[in-house]
Image (cartoon, helix red, strand yellow):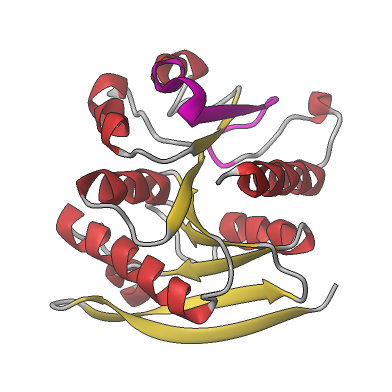
Amino acid sequence: MPHKISESKFLADVEKGEVSSILIRPKKADQLLVLGHGSGSHMRHALVESLAAALAEAGVATFRYNYPYSEKGGGGLNSQKVLLSTVRNAVAAASVAAEDLPLFAGGHSMSGRMTSMAQAEEPLPNVKGIVFFAFPTSGKADQRTEHFADVKLPILFFQGTRDKLTPLDSIEPAVKKLGKQATLHIVDTADHSFKILKRCGKTEEEVKEQMAGVFSEWASKVK
């Protein structure tokens, strides 16, 4: 399946300036996912790159992006204010880049959390749902999930059974509390970076393909 790939920049934050982004659009895309990376990586990290590739094969366009700190390389995270600003502006840029596609947003670990926090603070324009690829509770489940009540959008969780940063029993109560608003997809033997054990019976590529299929099917049912 041929995919159109385009790179561009957008203003992440007034003080921190522009960051890079990559749009992958399959020929027959059905949805667009704004896909952020985890705290210790960047938009070209193997995990988000492989997720984007699997999603493209499933007919899902992705808009990957850096934060100012990952654009620069090295150093620590930006402030929460800058992270939230970047998420909001990434969503806006993605919406313009593929305005004809239903829009979803989220990402791996930190980016998923920042996306839901941005949505809880003020609704992200045109976003129909939020997806978490390993939401990070980091031993603070109650504190980190309390904003879910203000998200007001369907949420899809991908969580691994070997995720030490977010054991299943630390996220399941929050998912249950959300009721029909939330969908939890458990990835057998996966850790926080979705690395799996051989006993899973699948390759990592097959696991990503399955996750992409789950996302596409879930997104197609979101009104």
Please say if 188 is above or below 93. above
Return the x and y of residue 215 as percentages of the image width and height: 65, 45
Apparent side of residue 125 relative to residue 76 in the rendered image (left or right): right
Magenta residues, start to end: 175-193
Q: Nearer the viewer, residue 183 or 159?
A: 183
Instruction: Note whether residue 76 is visible.
Output: no
Q: Residue at x 73, y 57 (%)?
A: 54
Apparent side of residue 82 relative to residue 100 in the rendered image (left or right): left
Query: Residue 185 lies in magenta, yes or no?
Result: yes
Q: Nearer the viewer, residue 9 or 216?
A: 216
Please say if 56 is above or below 177. below
Q: Residue at x 50, y 59 (%)?
A: 35
Instruction: Note whether residue 57 is visible.
Output: yes
Apparent side of residue 61 relative to residue 110 in the rendered image (left or right): right
Please say if 7 is above or below 39. below
Task: Residue at the far front: name it.
Answer: 223
Q: Nearer the viewer, residue 134 or 219?
A: 219
Q: Residue at x 86, y 29 (%)?
A: 201
Q: Residue at x 32, y 22 (%)?
A: 141
The quadrant of the image that shows the N terminus is bottom right
Return the x and y of residue 204 as percentages of the image width and height: 76, 44
Dividing the picture into quarters, in which one does residue 56 lie? bottom right
Query: Residue 82 lies in magenta, yes or no?
Result: no
